[in-house]
């Protein structure tokens, strides 16, 4: 799926979700009036605020790799991973040199030769 197609689908999803949310928030006081009475507008405000906040967080999470204030710092993360990998490779290269110079002969070395002769 191309990037423009993905953006179009996200926009369509977002606009549909917001339309349904507006209809829900307009009809919610009618449903709440029987249970909470005159507090229905206050309850509607609180519910609307929470749902719109969750929707806004979801919108920000849809595209985590964009270049805005809430995006992931991938450049810095990649630099850290690259530095760590090079450090691990350098350590393993140094340890290999030390092991090859000081490694004792294995216990089984030469046993097969003695048994064969």
Image (cartoon, rainbow, N blue to C red):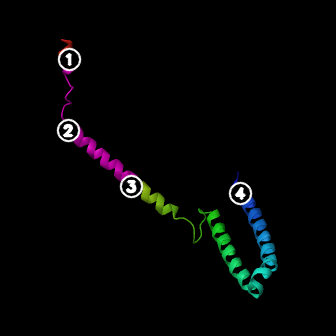
Residue corresponding to mark 4: 6
Q: Residue at x 71, y 77 (%)?
A: 48
Residue 29 x, y percent position in the rendering: 79, 80
- The quarter of the picture where residue 67 lies is bottom right
Label 3 or label 1, whichever lies nearer to me, is 1
Viewer-proximal residue, 111 or 1? 111
Q: Can you identify the residue that label 2 sits on? A: 101
Which circle's residue, 4 or 3, is located before the other in the chain? Answer: 4
The residue pinned by badge 1 equals 113
For the question of whether residue 40 can be seen, the reply is no
- Count of numbered circles on the image: 4
Residue position for label 3: 84
In the image: residue 23, left or right of residue 59: right
Residue at figure coordinates x 22%, y 18% from the top left: 112
Of badges 2 and 4, the one in the foreground is: 4
**Magenta highlight range:** 83-111
> Which is nearer the eye, 28 or 75?
28
In terms of secondary structure, where does tag 1 sit?
helix
């Amino acid at each position: 799926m191309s990037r423009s197609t993905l953006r179009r689908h996200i926009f369509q999803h977002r606009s549909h979700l917001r339309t349904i949310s507006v209809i829900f928030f307009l009809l919610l006081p009618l449903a709440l009036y029987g249970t909470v009475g005159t507090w229905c507008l206050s309850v509607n405000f609180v519910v609307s605020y929470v749902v719109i906040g969750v929707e806004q967080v979801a919108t920000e999470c849809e595209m985590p790799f964009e270049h805005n204030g809430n995006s992931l710092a991938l450049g810095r993360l990649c630099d850290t991973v690259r530095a760590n990998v090079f450090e691990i490779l350098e350590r393993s290269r140094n340890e290999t040199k030390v092991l090859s110079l000081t490694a004792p002969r294995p216990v089984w070395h030469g046993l097969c030769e003695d048994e064969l002769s």
